Amino acid sequence: MKSGVGILLLFFAVAMDLPAQDSYLYKCTTVQAAPGQLMALIDHLKTDLDKVRQSGEEPAYMFRHQQGDRWDLMILAPIGNYSDYFTSQAAQILEHPYGSDYYNYVALQEEGFVRGPNLDLFRQTWQNNTYFHAEMFVALPGKHEELYREREMENAYSQARGGIYNMIFTKENGFVWDIFTLGGYRDFKHYAETQMSTADKETAARQAGFESAAAIGPYLRSLINYHHDTLGAKID
C-alpha cells in the first residue's frame, strides 16, 4: 500500500530545475498541538524520532516554535526519494494512520515534500546549532524561480555581512508553502548578533545584486502572496 503511494507521488511530482546542492528530498511536517496537549505531543514525537534512530535509518529532526507562526513543531525527515521512504521503517513510524492515538494531541497538521540542501550540509547545520529561524513563503503566480533567486541573493547579502547561510527548501508537493528557508544559530544571542551586524549593508546589498539595502524588503514583497516566519529551539 505505502509503496504504491510512493510510486504515485513520484509519478506526479514536478520539480523546479534546482542546483544540484538543493535537490535532496525531505518531508516537512508542521504541527499545532491540541489545547493543553503540547507536552504530550512532544513526548509522542520524541518517542517516534527515537524509534527511527534505533532502526538504524536516517533520523528525523524537530524544533519547537517559540515565537512567530501558529504551529508549535516542525519535523524534517531527510528521505532521499519517495520509493525508499515509503517502504522504510521510518515511514511506518512517522506516517500516522487516520484515527490513530497520535491525533488526540493534534489540532492542525500540514505536510509537504520539499527539495533542499545536500544531506551533509543539513546534518552539519542541525548538529552545530540549537536555535533556528524559518521563513516560509507563498509565491505570486509566475514568480517561483525569481523568488528562489531572491533567497540566494539574501544568502549572499547575509554572508557578506558576516551572517549565516540559510538552507533553501522548495515544494515538490503537499502543503501550501512554495519555498522556505531555515537558518541555524548557536543560540538566541548568535541570532541577535547577526541581525544587528555593523558591516557595510549597502556594499553587501549591491554585491548580492540588490539596488540597495532598503530595496531588499520591497523586492521580496513584489514576489510573494504572503509569508510567515518562526523562531525556535531544536528538540533532541
Image (cartoon, rainbow, N blue to C red):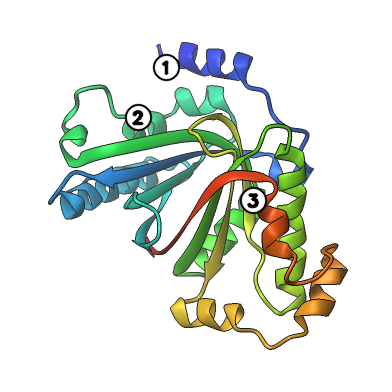
Q: Amino acid at mark 1?
A: Lys
Question: Secondary structure under badge 2?
Answer: loop
Q: Which residue is mark 3?
A: 168
Q: Amino acid at mark 2?
A: Glu
Q: Check whether the beta carbons of the residues at disc 2 and disc 3 lie within 8 A of each other.
A: no
Q: Residue at x 35, y 29 (%)?
A: 95
Residue nearest the observer in this picture, 82 or 13: 13
Q: Which residue is mark 1?
A: 2
Labels 2 and 3: the sequence-earlier one: 2
Depth check, mark 2 against mark 3: the one in front is: 3
Residue 76's place in the image compared with 208, above or below, is above
In the rendered structure, the answer to whether residue 208 lies left or right of residue 13 reads right
**Separation of residues labelled 2 and 1 (CA atoms):** 10 Å
**Separation of residues labelled 1 and 3 (CA atoms):** 28 Å
The percent coordinates of residue 184 (x first, y second) are 54, 66
Labels 2 and 1: the sequence-earlier one: 1
Other residues around mark 1 within 10 Å, as few (<14) / some (14–19) / many (≥20): some
Q: Residue at x 70, y 79 (%)?
A: 162
Question: Secondary structure under badge 3?
Answer: strand
Residue 70's place in the image compared with 102, above or below, is below
In the rendered structure, the answer to whether residue 81 lies left or right of residue 208 reads left
Mark count: 3
**Is there any visible trace of residue 8 in the rendered image?**
yes
Q: Amino acid at mark 3?
A: Ile
Other residues around mark 3 within 10 Å, as few (<14) / some (14–19) / many (≥20): many
Q: Residue at x 15, y 36 (%)?
A: 104
Other residues around mark 2 within 10 Å, as few (<14) / some (14–19) / many (≥20): few
Q: Residue at x 75, y 79 (%)?
A: 201
Residue nearest the observer in this picture, 36 or 85: 36
Labels 1 and 3: the sequence-earlier one: 1
Q: Which residue is mark 2?
A: 95
The percent coordinates of residue 129 (x first, y second) are 50, 69
